[in-house]
Image: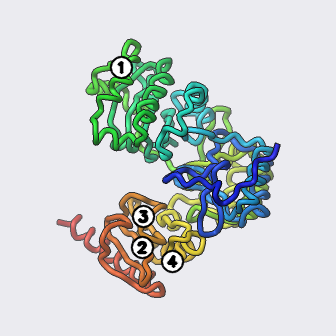
Amino acid sequence: MSAPVLSPSAVPSRRGVCPGLSRPLPTGDGLLVRILPISTITLDAFAGLCAAARPHGNGIIEITARGSIQVRGLSAHSAPRFADAIAALGIAAEDGVPILCNPLAGLDATEIFDASAFAAALRRAVKPQSLDGRLDPKVSVVIDGGAPLNLARVAADIRVRAQLHNGQPVLRLAIGGDDRNPFDLGCIALDDGVEAVSRLLLVLAERGARARDIIAAEGLACFDDAFAFARRGSVAPRDREGAKRIEADSAPRQCSDAIGLHALRDGSLACGIGLAFGHTEASTLEKLANTATAAGARGLRTAPNRSLLAIGLTTESAMRFSAAAAQLGFVTRAADPRRHVIACAGAPLCASAYIAARAIAPDVAAAAAPYLSDGLCIHVSGCAKGCAHPGTAPLTVLGTPGDCALVADGSARDAPFAAAPLHELPNVIADHLRERCKIGEKIRHV
């Protein structure tokens, strides 16, 4: 049965709602839909998705910082037809509370437990509770299986991370933030994990708020109470200091880069590549799928930081795939300067934007290239909302009705230290970064 045709009034207006297939989001270039895959996408299905994005949308496809696929430029008439096309392809995608797993969950040779199996059990458990309409639309859950290619830098309301205790896997639960700054609840046995997370989701649903907002208003008590049921099977349930006794090296907090090669359980490899500035043409992605087919891959997975992983390659075929991907304009080196620039869709794709953020991003990357370091990123935002990177950045370039504003060590909402016309922007950025490097050198030699 075909999906109903959406009228403009049918487009959801709930603030912050995520633009899924059934609820596209109005943007400057039409409607946008988001797909969060939960397993490997076959190459035929991925090529079919790309093919459907051209007649139903404007042919632009994005991979987001959290690993979702976004298709732009749909209309109220074409969005249901696109949804039908995706349904026919059989792509397994999240359809409820966003539950994110390691990019290679179930396949990674180094994972402690299969996060995808846990996620499937959690989806089955929470589905009868009909939480979608009660939860804040931005609520998400991260399940980290303990592999180096993990979700340590992906923020979520509920975090589940596998660790080893006396050589056995346990789950550490935390609330809010990424792996560097969550509110820790403690460790529990694997068998108690699904019920624990379900109860934590109920706490969020009852209040209709994000985890950190609840903690700010009430403290951790409500989450501690929801977690208490699992203490009978927990590992050191009341002892948060007991975390220090857990074998920390079993679940590294540093996140490996998706770009490059990753060993899989079956002896094959995954090869990661990135989308420059998070977007490309659907026809180019379709060519990438054909390249993966020629290399002998069995499918593709999305990954955080705007990346894709080709699954099931040999060392030789991975090298061929990577070289072909580079020819198509994809990022194949972790040190590529384009990875240091985070650009929103910008004008004219976004109705709020004052500058064509993605169009100027290559010039920004080129100007910054001589001064880049591991921790330096440049956020190019079309407006003060800062959607592509809500947090702080060493340098933020902000579109305004006049010149471009520049913010140092802040966000798009902070006060700028300088302004520059668009045609002078690359030079101004280079001058600022050059001076920043000089100051850094002086500090290191003090």
Where disc 2 sits, the SS reads strand
Where disc 1 sits, the SS reads helix
Amino acid type of the residue that numbered disc 2 sits on in the rendered structure: Leu
Quadrant of res 389: bottom left
Amino acid type of the residue that numbered disc 1 sits on in the rendered structure: Ala
Residue carrying label 1:
228
What label sits on residue 398 in the rendered view? 2
Q: CA distance from mark 3 to mark 4?
A: 19 Å
Q: Residue 323 appears at what percent x and percent y?
A: 68, 60
Q: CA distance from mark 2 to mark 1?
A: 46 Å
Mark found first going from the N terminus, 3 or 1: 1
Q: CA distance from mark 2 to mark 3?
A: 14 Å
Q: Quadrant of the N terminus?
A: top right
- Residue 118 vertical placement versus 6 (above, below): above
Q: Residue 27 appears at what percent x and percent y?
A: 59, 65
Mark found first going from the N terminus, 2 or 3: 3
- Residue 57 visible in this rendered orientation of the protein: yes
Outermost residue toward the left?
446
- Residue 432 vertical placement versus 177 (above, below): below
Mark 4: few, some, or many residues within 10 Å (few <14, many ≥20)? many
Residue carrying label 3:
377
Q: Quadrant of the C terminus?
A: bottom left
Q: CA distance from mark 3 to mark 1?
A: 41 Å
Residue carrying label 4:
355
| Lateral position of residue 82 relative to residue 232, left or right | right
Outermost residue toward the top?
232
Where disc 3 sits, the SS reads loop
Amino acid type of the residue that numbered disc 4 sits on in the rendered structure: Ile
Mark found first going from the N terminus, 4 or 1: 1
- Residue 312 visible in this rendered orientation of the protein: no
Where disc 4 sits, the SS reads loop
Amino acid type of the residue that numbered disc 3 sits on in the rendered structure: Cys
